[in-house]
Image: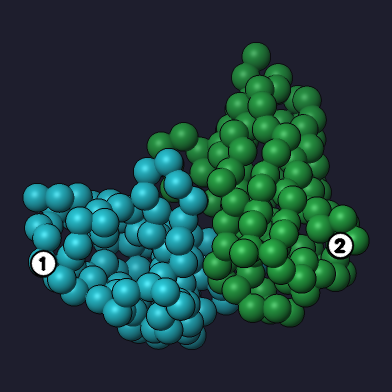
Amino acid sequence: QVQLVESGGGMVQPGRSLRLSCAASGFTFSDYGIHWVRQAPGKGLEWVAVIWYDGSTKYYADSVKGRFTISRDNPKNMLYLQMNSLRAEDTAVYFCARDRLAFSINWFDHWGQGTLVTVSS
Amino acid sequence: DIQMTQSPSSVSASVGDRVTITCRASQGIISWLAWYQQRPGTAPKLLIYGASSLQSGVPSRFSGSGSGTDFTLTISGLQPEDFATYYCQQANIFPYTFGQGTKLEIK
């Protein structure tokens, strides 16, 4: 079955960096676009970034553009989110989520359990 | 960016009731809209995509409608497991955006 498992979260000081990982299994990873979505404590969902199935195209939320970089390693079935210049407002649970259909980008039908990132001094 | 506004922000209802949640986009998104359910401490679950298509495995008491800027999610015959928070999401233009959420509580 489809599984997405995030890791790499933790507590980090403002201005520092952190890299999140998402390990995928149970499907042909290289056929699907993958997103990062975050949720601040007690708040709603915020879409963060997406990467095309082949890594050719990436889009970011304005709030993270220039600071975060999404990437993937298809042979390893891994997705990454490099987060630089972290701010307190980046504190959230970060989910990776798979697109519903191969070779398309729109809805998220499988999600990981999330990893918590806390930015605090 | 496209702003998604849900109403109400919260609603109380009883088991067996019919509930309707509304989502309005700040500009037309055709039918590029999805609905998600999120229970506390868990990841969101896709319910409806393309404004009105039911995701596989989702009970038929959930239905979606609308196009352009105005959309609705209807739950007919509320079950205890339906009490959760619901989000709409537009997939017409990047950056994708979610509504602020509607919390469905037990009356």
Q: In this view, does A114 lie to the left or right of A59?
A: left
The amino acid at mark 2 is Asn
Write down the quadrant of residue B79 in the picture: bottom left
Query: Residue drawn 70% across and 19% down?
Result: A13
Query: Residue drawn 41% across and 80% down?
Result: B54
Query: Residue drawn 52% across and 44% down?
Result: A39
C-alpha span from label 1 to label 2: 46 Å
Where is residue A87? Give x, y as percent: 66, 30
Q: Mark 2 points at which residue?
A: A74
Q: Could you say which is closer to the camera, residue B72 or residue A110? A: A110
Task: Tell me if label 1 and label 2 are in contact, CB under 8 Å.
Answer: no
Q: Mark 1 points at which residue?
A: B17
Q: Could you say which is closer to the camera, residue B17 or residue A26? A: A26
Q: Which chain is green?
A: A
Q: Could you say which is closer to the camera, residue A9 or residue A66? A: A9
Query: Can I make out residue B73 in this image?
Result: yes
Mark 2 secondary-structure assignment: helix
Chain letter, disc 2 residue = A
Q: Which chain is cyan?
A: B
Chain letter, disc 1 residue = B
Furthest residue in direction right, as rendered: A75
Query: Residue drawn 78% across and 25% down?
Result: A16
Furthest residue in direction top, as rendered: A121
Task: Classify 10 Å Cα crowding around label 1: few (below 14), some (14-19), many (20 and above).
Answer: few
Image quadrant holding the C terminus of chain A, namely: top right
Where is residue A120? Give x, y as percent: 62, 19
Does A16 sit above or below residue A102?
above
Q: Is residue A97 left or right of residue B47?
A: right
Where is residue A36? Give x, y as percent: 65, 53
Mark 1 secondary-structure assignment: loop
